[in-house]
């Protein structure tokens, strides 16, 4: 400030705290954020209840069944992650953002912190409600699982965490690709189509495909075994290893996105 | 104070900005003139660190933009109309920017008042007219009460009352000792607003002068501008070719 300084300039410098505050205001001030999150949670819970109502096999992994709605829910969380980044490019807000926070990796780190926290909370809430709702609606004399049963609490908590991880994967893809439709397309094609096909064709790779990790590692209470037909069935990761692999995907996407964000023109 | 030193930027085979050097001093409005496609917007993006120069550097208040401690408190910029999310309200847009540079929340309502958007501040900004979008952009530029202002075509889409408002605002900001750098292709408007001029064509500096000096010897500033840029207008050559073929 040269000649006019009516407001006091604070000491220090902008940092992650300021960037995070900015991103929190940006995320919460869009109505579409809350609609998408509400639909995500409602879908997860609704599918859980539908599966619960139709369960007839008491020996099935009932917790895994109750969490069946997590798979489509993740799609919305991932797409919202993409849009959190790409909508800035579509609208031109990115230039205002980067003029305010020129150290660009801070911007992506702040977005990841805010979006990751919101999707973790929404994912856990949706996952827990789906579990309890499905358990409460079981018929045909099937005994409902409880959180105290072996592996149940882990399955519910890790399924909720998957929303955060797939959401962050979407955020990273958005930063890499920058165009909404293209980035959502890559997310859906990559996570839901290509990875699934690879999983069916190459069994050794199946254990590392995101949705198969969710279905066979994170949301299960006991290891997925192949029974008599072992040759046609891959070995799936343990729940914690699955969580690690999903986290790694999110970290790679965010690191690549941050690297590109720092180097490209805005 | 804005200093551009030997700025060059190519996009593929096109040289958008070519060894451009100039200073913009505090205390007066400096107009940034040039034909369409002459590199004005690119230069502004280079100053703000949004694009990287191939060679040279730009400094604001003696520092590179990315070295600024609180960028919005030192430099305010209006780069394009409607550079905001259509679903977000004007107030939330400004509140987010204020938070990024620890600017008090009360300043948001202050600048909304200054630009005449107080009553529309809660509506989704996507519903704004082009003129209202420009006013929101000006509000964002003023948010940090910066000593340096860069505005790219700020009168685009404004009604006559808005044009006069911008003119008086820029003059009063300069009179307060701020550095005001404003691009336009409206020469008549610059003649009324600016004291100093930086004129470029095809990315090169054509003149770094005052309005009075440039107009001297010509019937008007417009005539002087056309004489200066006659060799630096690409589309005119093309239209000539089309006309003769």
Image (cartoon, coloured by chain):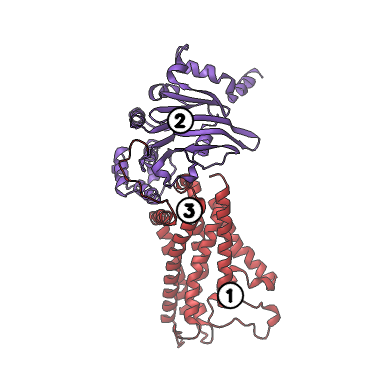
Q: Is residue A21 left or right of residue B231?
A: left
The label shown at residue A107 is 3
Q: Chain B's shade in the image?
A: purple
Instruction: Please name which of the two marks, 2 or 3, marks the residue nearer to the observer.
Output: 2
- Which residue lies under the disc numbered 2? B24
- Which residue lies under the disc numbered 1? A241
Q: Is residue B36 visible?
A: yes
Identify the chain of the residue marked 1, using the numbered disc in the image: A
Q: Residue at x 57, y 68 (%)?
A: A246
Q: Helix or strand or loop: what does disc 2 sit on? A: strand
Density class for disc 3 (Cα within 10 Å; few <14, some 14-19, many ≥20) is many
Density class for disc 2 (Cα within 10 Å; few <14, some 14-19, many ≥20) is many
Q: Residue at x 36, y 49 (%)?
A: A10
Q: CA distance from mark 1 to mark 3?
A: 30 Å
Q: CA distance from mark 2 to mark 3?
A: 30 Å
Identify the chain of the residue marked 2, using the numbered disc in the image: B
Instruction: Please name which of the two marks, 1 or 3, marks the residue nearer to the observer.
Output: 3
Closer-to-camera residue (A57/B203): B203
Residue A119 % position (x, y) = 45, 65
Q: Is residue B156 visible?
A: no
Dots 1 and 3: beta carbons under 8 Å? no
Residue B195 % position (x, y) = 41, 23
Q: Helix or strand or loop: what does disc 3 sit on? A: helix
Tag 2 and tag 1 share a subunit: no
Relative height, residue B196 to residue A49 (above, below): above
Classify the position of the N terminus of chain A by image quarter: top left
Closer-to-camera residue (A213/B102): B102
In the image, the chain rendered in red is: A
Density class for disc 1 (Cα within 10 Å; few <14, some 14-19, many ≥20) is some
Q: CA distance from mark 2 to mark 1?
A: 58 Å
Dots 2 and 3: beta carbons under 8 Å? no
Residue A170 % position (x, y) = 53, 59
């Amino acid at each position: 400030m040269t000649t006019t300084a009516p407001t006091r300039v604070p000491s220090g410098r902008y940092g992650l705290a300021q960037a995070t505050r900015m991103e929190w205001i940006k995320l919460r001030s869009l109505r579409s954020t809350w609609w998408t999150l509400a639909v995500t949670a409602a879908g997860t819970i609704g599918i859980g209840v539908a599966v619960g109502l139709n369960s007839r096999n008491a020996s099935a992994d009932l917790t895994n069944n109750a969490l069946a709605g997590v798979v489509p829910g993740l799609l919305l969380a991932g797409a919202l992650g993409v849009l959190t980044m790409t909508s800035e490019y579509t609208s031109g807000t990115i230039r205002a953002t980067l003029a305010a926070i020129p150290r660009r990796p801070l911007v992506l780190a702040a977005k990841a912190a805010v979006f990751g926290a919101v999707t973790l909370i929404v994912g856990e809430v949706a996952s827990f409600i789906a579990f309890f709702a499905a358990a409460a609606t079981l018929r045909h004399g099937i005994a409902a699982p409880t959180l105290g049963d072996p592996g149940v609490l882990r399955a519910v908590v890790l399924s909720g965490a998957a929303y955060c991880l797939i959401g962050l994967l979407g955020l990273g893809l958005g930063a890499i690709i920058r165009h909404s439709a293209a980035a959502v397309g890559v997310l859906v094609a990559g996570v839901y189509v290509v990875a699934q096909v690879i999983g069916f064709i190459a069994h050794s790779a199946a254990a590392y495909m995101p949705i198969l990790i969710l279905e066979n590692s994170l949301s299960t209470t006991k290891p997925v075994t192949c029974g008599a037909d072992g040759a046609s069935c891959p070995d799936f990761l343990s729940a914690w290893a699955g969580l690690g692999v999903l986290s790694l995907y999110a970290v790679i996407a965010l690191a690549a996105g941050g690297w590109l964000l720092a180097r490209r023109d805005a | 104070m804005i200093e551009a030193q030997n700025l060059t930027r190519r996009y593929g085979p096109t040289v958008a900005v070519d060894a451009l050097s100039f200073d913009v001093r505090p205390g007066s409005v400096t107009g940034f003139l040039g034909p369409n496609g002459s590199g004005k917007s690119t230069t502004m993006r280079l100053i703000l660190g949004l694009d990287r120069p191939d060679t040279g550097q730009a400094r604001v208040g003696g520092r590179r933009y990315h070295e600024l401690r609180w960028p919005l408190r030192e430099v305010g910029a209006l780069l394009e109309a409607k550079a905001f999310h259509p679903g977000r309200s004007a107030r939330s847009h400004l509140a987010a920017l204020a938070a990024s540079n620890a600017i008090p929340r009360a300043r948001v309502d202050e600048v909304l008042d200054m630009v005449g958007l107080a009553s529309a501040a809660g509506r989704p900004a996507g519903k704004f007219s082009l003129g209202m979008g420009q006013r929101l952009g000006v509000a964002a530029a003023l948010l940090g009460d910066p000593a340096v202002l860069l505005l790219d075509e700020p009168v685009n889409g404004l009604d006559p009352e808005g044009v006069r408002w911008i003119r008086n605002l820029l003059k009063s900001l300069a009179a307060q000792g701020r550095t005001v750098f404003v691009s336009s292709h409206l020469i008549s408007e610059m003649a009324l607003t600016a004291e100093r001029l930086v004129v470029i064509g095809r990315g090169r500096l054509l003149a770094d002068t005052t309005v009075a000096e440039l107009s001297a010897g010509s019937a008007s500033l417009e005539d002087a501008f056309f004489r200066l840029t006659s060799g630096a207008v690409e589309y005119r050559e093309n239209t000539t070719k089309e006309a003769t073929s």
